[in-house]
Image (cartoon, coloured by chain):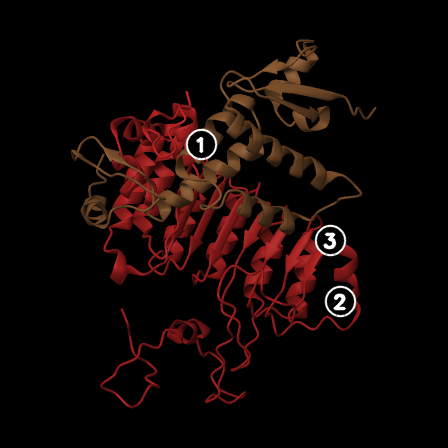
């Protein structure tokens, strides 16, 4: 039966978020906690800050709404929403990193997939923040842009793929 | 643990399983030229056989820019899979030797994709087929394999469920050929999914396929201009096939270039026996700024 029970989630910095159960159980981790009856009071999430938890909730809410009959959104539109959600001006490098860890900890497969794909695309586009231990130089990344001189060096080493 | 520093995270501290998830979304070339160069822990991930169960050598085919030995890279990928590769995609390169190298070492291949592999011969493909008993999904697009090699594939791969044999569509000159369709009909009875984009198949070949492949659910006949579905055969297709693409259906979801390169200088009654393979290779007209005449047929680019 459809439950509109509210669940309270508490972030690592002490902020409380009240969400519908349907949204909360997008996270398999939270789902299991509820099933194991650990969710009478607020569910503490010591690995997730309020900033990140807010974004995770925003994502889960959209995906739950998208599958409901009255608000049904087609696949194309949801993909477009995902792309806008994760866009570089919305989500800086550090936030992306934190989102990945949160999606992993909370076991939200689709969010983990989206964030990992974003990073894979950055690697493909040579926009990935790298510290190359062997070659002894570090890239400092701001706004996901590689410093050009380092990029030239890095690209020159593309041939060293031998095992 | 996340700090509140807005700019810096050490990406190399991502847990190994997450880094693996990310790297698995890259193609083989990116892994070998970029990802494995990042740090020792990523290099260790990139050597894990689990990373190489699926070897996707996708590339743009632009060798002038790439300057990479794809054949060698592919061999390295095969080595790293420790025989566990089940899925391999080779495009714009590939030789009989590479195919043999692959099938000698990997006995459980279920998916094989060869696209624009002009240097793989009928013999190479036939030999490889004998080592691919578990093959379920095969694509041979923009290659030019004979009907005999297709027959061999069908006979050696009884589990084949999906087959894509795409080529350039054209109407001029008018050529009809049911050889490939007959090879499929005779030997690939288990097919559920068949894509024959740009094929020279006629209604007769289509009928043979429908008769012999009772499990067929998806059939793509786009740019098969010799097929006429405005009759009983068309009705039968609609009834038998769940997802049917007709010859003139839109091509926006087709992954390759669907431009029809009709050669208007040929008449319809050009003598038969003209090789349609030779025609389809001359789509890449390079611009020679020294020449005024752009119609350089018969120019061998190899």
Estimate the x, y position of residue A9 in percent, counting from the top left.
Answer: 62, 20
Determine the colour of chain B.
red
Q: Are marks 1 and 3 in contact (CB under 8 Å)?
A: no
Q: Quadrant location of the C terminus of chain B?
A: bottom left
SS of the residue under disc 2: helix
Residues tagged by mark 2 and mark 1 found on one chain of the structure: yes
Point out the frontmost of discs 1 and 3. Answer: 1
Residue on which disc 1 sits: B21
Residue on which disc 3 sits: B242
Mark 3 burial class by Cα count in 10 Å: few <14, some 14-19, many 20+: few
Which chain does the residue under circle 2 lie in? Answer: B
Residue depicted at x 40% and y 33%: A94
Which chain does the residue under circle 1 lie in? Answer: B
Residue depicted at x 66% and y 19%: A8
Q: Quadrant location of the N terminus of chain B?
A: top left
Could you say which quadrant of the image residue B56 lies in?
top left
Determine the colour of chain A.
brown
**Residue A60 or A55: which is nearer the viewer?**
A55
Estimate the x, y position of residue A56 in percent, counting from the top left.
Answer: 57, 31
Using the rendered image of the protein, determine whether residue B107 is visible from the camera's viewpoint: no
Sequence-first disc among 2 and 1: 1
Q: Say which mark, if any, is on residue B234.
A: 2
C-alpha span from label 2 to label 3: 13 Å
Residue depicted at x 67% and y 68%: B204
Residues tagged by mark 1 and mark 3 found on one chain of the structure: yes
The answer to whether A55 appears left or right of B207 in the picture is: left
Estimate the x, y position of residue A7 in percent, counting from the top left.
Answer: 69, 20
Residue depicted at x 47% and y 40%: A91
SS of the residue under disc 3: loop
Mark 1 burial class by Cα count in 10 Å: few <14, some 14-19, many 20+: some
SS of the residue under disc 1: helix
C-alpha span from label 2 to label 1: 45 Å
């Amino acid at each position: 039966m459809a439950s509109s029970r509210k669940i309270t989630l508490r972030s690592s910095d002490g902020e409380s978020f009240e969400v519908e159960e349907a949204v909360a159980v997008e996270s398999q981790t939270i789902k299991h906690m509820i099933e194991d009856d650990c969710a009478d009071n607020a569910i503490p999430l010591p690995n997730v800050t309020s900033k990140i938890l807010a974004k995770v909730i925003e994502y889960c809410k959209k995906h739950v709404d998208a599958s409901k009959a009255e608000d049904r959104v087609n696949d194309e539109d949801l993909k477009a929403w995902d792309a806008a959600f994760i866009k570089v001006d919305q989500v800086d490098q550090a936030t992306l990193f934190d989102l990945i860890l949160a999606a992993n900890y909370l076991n939200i497969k689709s969010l983990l997939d989206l964030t990992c794909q974003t990073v894979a695309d950055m690697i493909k586009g040579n926009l990935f923040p790298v510290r190359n231990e062997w070659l002894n130089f570090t890239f400092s990344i701001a706004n996901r842009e590689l410093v050009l001189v380092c990029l030239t060096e890095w690209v020159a080493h593309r041939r060293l793929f031998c095992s | 643990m996340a700090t509140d520093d807005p700019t810096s995270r050490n990406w190399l501290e991502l847990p190994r399983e997450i880094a693996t998830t990310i790297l698995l979304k890259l193609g083989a070339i990116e892994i070998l030229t970029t990802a494995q160069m990042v740090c020792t822990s990523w290099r260790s991930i990139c050597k894990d056989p689990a990373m190489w169960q699926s070897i996707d050598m996708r590339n743009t085919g632009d060798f002038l820019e790439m300057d990479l030995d794809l054949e060698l890279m592919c061999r390295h990928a095969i080595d790293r899979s420790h025989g566990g590769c089940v899925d391999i995609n080779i495009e714009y390169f590939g030789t009989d030797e590479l195919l043999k190298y692959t099938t000698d070492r990997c006995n459980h291949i279920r998916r094989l994709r060869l696209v624009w592999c002009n240097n793989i011969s009928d013999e190479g493909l036939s030999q490889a087929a004998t080592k691919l008993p578990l093959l379920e999904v095969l694509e041979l697009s923009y290659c030019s394999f004979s009907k005999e090699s297709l027959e061999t594939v069908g006979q050696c791969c009884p589990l084949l469920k999906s087959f894509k044999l795409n080529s350039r569509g054209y109407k001029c000159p008018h050529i009809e050929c049911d050889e490939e369709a007959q090879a499929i009909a005779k030997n690939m009875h288990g097919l559920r999914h068949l894509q024959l984009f740009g094929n020279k198949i006629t209604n007769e070949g289509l009928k043979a396929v429908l008769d012999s492949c009772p499990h067929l659910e998806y059939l793509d006949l786009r740019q098969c201009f010799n097929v006429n579905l405005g009759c009983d055969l068309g009705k039968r297709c609609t009834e038998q096939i769940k997802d049917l693409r007709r010859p003139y259906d839109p091509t926006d979801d087709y992954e390759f270039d669907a431009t029809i390169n009709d050669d208007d200088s040929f008449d319809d009654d050009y003598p038969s026996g003209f090789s349609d393979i030779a025609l389809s290779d001359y789509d890449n007209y390079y611009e020679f700024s020294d020449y005024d005449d752009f119609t350089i047929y018969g120019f061998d680019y190899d």
